[in-house]
Amino acid sequence: MLPRHQRAAMVLKFGEDKKIEEIAQIMGKSAGAVKLLLHRAVERLRRELPPEFEAGLT
């Protein structure tokens, strides 16, 4: 399971198709912080999910 902030960033980016700047404003974070949250979330999912899910994380 992803930490709350990483999960929220992923939902906003991929579920609601928001831009980084929009996510930053919604979450009260900088664009760089949002990029880092998304990067760490994807890396965590790559480690935790079975290999057949890898194609969907690129």
Image (tube, helix red, strand yellow):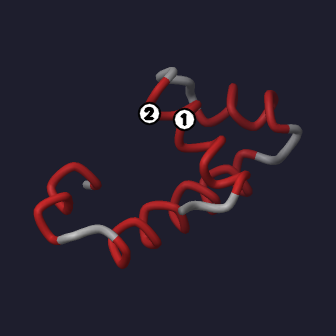
Numbered circle sitting on residue 14: 2
Q: Quadrant of the N terminus?
A: bottom right
CB under 8 Å between callouts 2 and 1?
yes
Report the Cα–Cα distance between label 2 and label 1: 5 Å
- Residue at the bottom extreme, as displayed: 47
Identify the residue shown where x is 46% and y is 72%. Answer: 44
Specify the amino acid type for callout 1.
Val
- Element under label 2? helix
Identify the amino acid type marked 2.
Phe
Q: Write down the quadrant of residue 31 in the picture.
A: top right
Front residue (pair 29, 46): 46
The percent position of residue 48, horizontal first and vertical second, equals 37, 74
Percent of width and height locating residue 23: 69, 33
The residue lying at 56 percent from left, 24 percent from top is 18
Question: Which numbered dot is residue 11?
Answer: 1
**Residue 55 image offset from top left, x and y in percent:** 15, 55
| Residue 6 figure quarter | bottom right
Which residue is found at the position 73% from the left and 56% from the top?
A: 33
